[in-house]
Image (cartoon, rainbow, N blue to C red):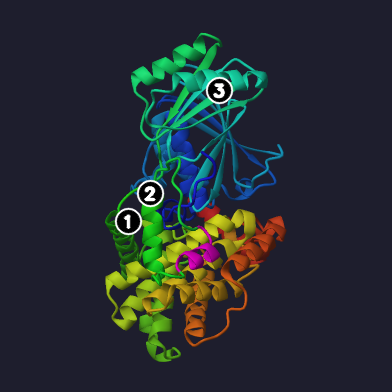
Amino acid sequence: MGKQAPSIFNDVIGPVMRGPSSSHVAGAARIGDLLRQLAENQLKKVTVDFDINGSLAESHEGHGTDMGFACGILGIPLTEPCVDRYQNLMEESGIELQYRIYDYGAEHPNHYRICAMTNAADTIRMDAVSTGGGMIEVTALEGCPVSALGDTYETFFLISADETSIPEATRVTEEAAKEISSLENLTVTAGEGICAVNLKTSSAMTENEHAAVEHSLSAKWNIKKVYCMTPILPTHSSAGKSVPFKTASELLSYNEDKNLPLWKLAVLYESIRGNTTEEHVIAQMHELVEIMSRAAAEGLAGTEYADRILHVQANKMQEKQEKLVPGSVVNDIIKYITAIMEAKSAMKVIVAAPTAGSCGCLPGTLLALEHSLGLSREDTVRGMFAAGMIGIIFAELATFAAEVGGCQMECGAGSGMAAAGITQMMGGTAKECIDAASVALQGLTGLACDPVANRVEVPCLNKNIVGGMNALSSTNMILAGFDRVIPLDETIRAMLDIGLKLPLELRCTFGGLGKTETSLRIRKELELRRK
């Protein structure tokens, strides 16, 4: 099928979740969910290895990986209020779960090397990565390289063969699969003494279709295992779907004779990408904005949660108003971003946008603008679509994983998206939205990810607020006629280049503010509090 174009609802605005980090909690949950599917809900023991040089070795507990993965293998949605009771739930399930830290040369900082045993004493080996913003990829099954993103139905026939059998296995499977109308893609890959025959379909294969493929393969090879997965992402993928643009330059070229606002271009893009109607896409975004609004309201009302660094502060913006530098929009942005970040830290339901660590910047900024300027919810939804389109371009050209490129990929990306959203809400053109995003991103290149006490709270709140302020100033600069100088596509590519050159300890591990004396003290206090 090849690389699929990003989706606003898969890659950018979402997932809807509880917990501190989308890469760690939501990504882990999705990986755990796919493992649970492979085991047909019969898991008995699961061992997960993290590479000592990756992000997860240091952060898997504090950033919520343990929680997310446990919920995934238990089949508990991350919107359920019980997710932070995952340790008790695991004990009740009887599933044994073990994490090990090794130096095994993982190529990705968020790599999972998994070995599981089922109640029937079958062994499952699976490799996967959390690629940022809750997106994941299964990269190997039983030692065979594969690629499963959770956006299609997957059927894997593992046969006793070697790489010399790939052409014949492909031919045999293609012949057997001719009657499968929902077939999207077929690949055969080889490991050591085993080949993985992978059929991606838009709907689950029928018993007859499954039997036909199995019969054809078993006539020539011993079928060692058969694995099936159902989609876990909100937007499914289909072969042959060609989106009209994926970069800013392509979008502007497409729009040259149409003069459409960015939000309409985003709706058009997502309807084509998801093979659905524009009305359905707009309804989806309304639902997400409503969840964001509820998170802000919960934060403004005050939240309580013992296991966190920061406590209620959003209300201080109102209580100390007479002492603040005047500026209703600016101070509302600070208040709303803080409220959403506090809701996240209190395990309330939030929308990762584009990640959980940066979940305050974009929605907090746009909701504050709606409140301060008396704009409509429809204006906010349109702003969110404009932001989502910038996120699509960012996902296409870079990554949302701080573990790969630092916090510029999370709060930085959120700021660029927010700048486009504000510009849309203020009536800006598609080009002005894109230019505002570029200016915002240029102001945050090289932003490190250095969480205090191994938590996604400090300096995450500060960086979300900085992102909102940066978005506001970038919008005003462009609407006033400032020159953005560097085009958006070039800016994003430069950010990725910078991010890949950041030291490992500044990419969501244990550096910067995270290794200060105060950070170490807070971390120890939190660990003692949990005992």
| Front: mark 1 or 3 | 3
- Quarter of the rendering containing residue 43: top left
Residue 274: which numbered mark, if any?
A: 2
Q: Residues within 10 Å of mark 2 (few under 14, many from 20)?
A: many
CA separation in Å, label 2 and label 1: 9 Å
At numbered mark 2, what does the secondary structure look like: helix, strand or loop?
loop
User: Which amino acid type is marked by label 2?
Assistant: Gly
Residue 97: which numbered mark, if any?
A: none
Residue 347, visible in the rendered structure: no
Foreground pick, 77 / 444: 444
Q: Earlier in the sequence, mark 2 or mark 1?
A: 2
Q: Which residue is mark 1?
A: 281
Tell me which segment is drawn in magenta. Answer: 246-255
Measuring from the top left, give residue 52's x and y in whole percent: 68, 43
| Up-down relation of residue 228 to residue 267 (above or below) | above
Q: Residues within 10 Å of mark 1 (few under 14, many from 20)?
A: many
| Front: mark 2 or 3 | 3
Q: Earlier in the sequence, mark 1 or mark 3?
A: 3
User: Which amino acid type is marked by label 1?
Assistant: Val
The residue lying furthest to the front in this view is: 257
User: Which amino acid type is marked by label 3?
Assistant: Thr
Check contact, mark 2 vs mark 1: CB within 8 A: yes
Residue 170: which numbered mark, if any?
A: 3
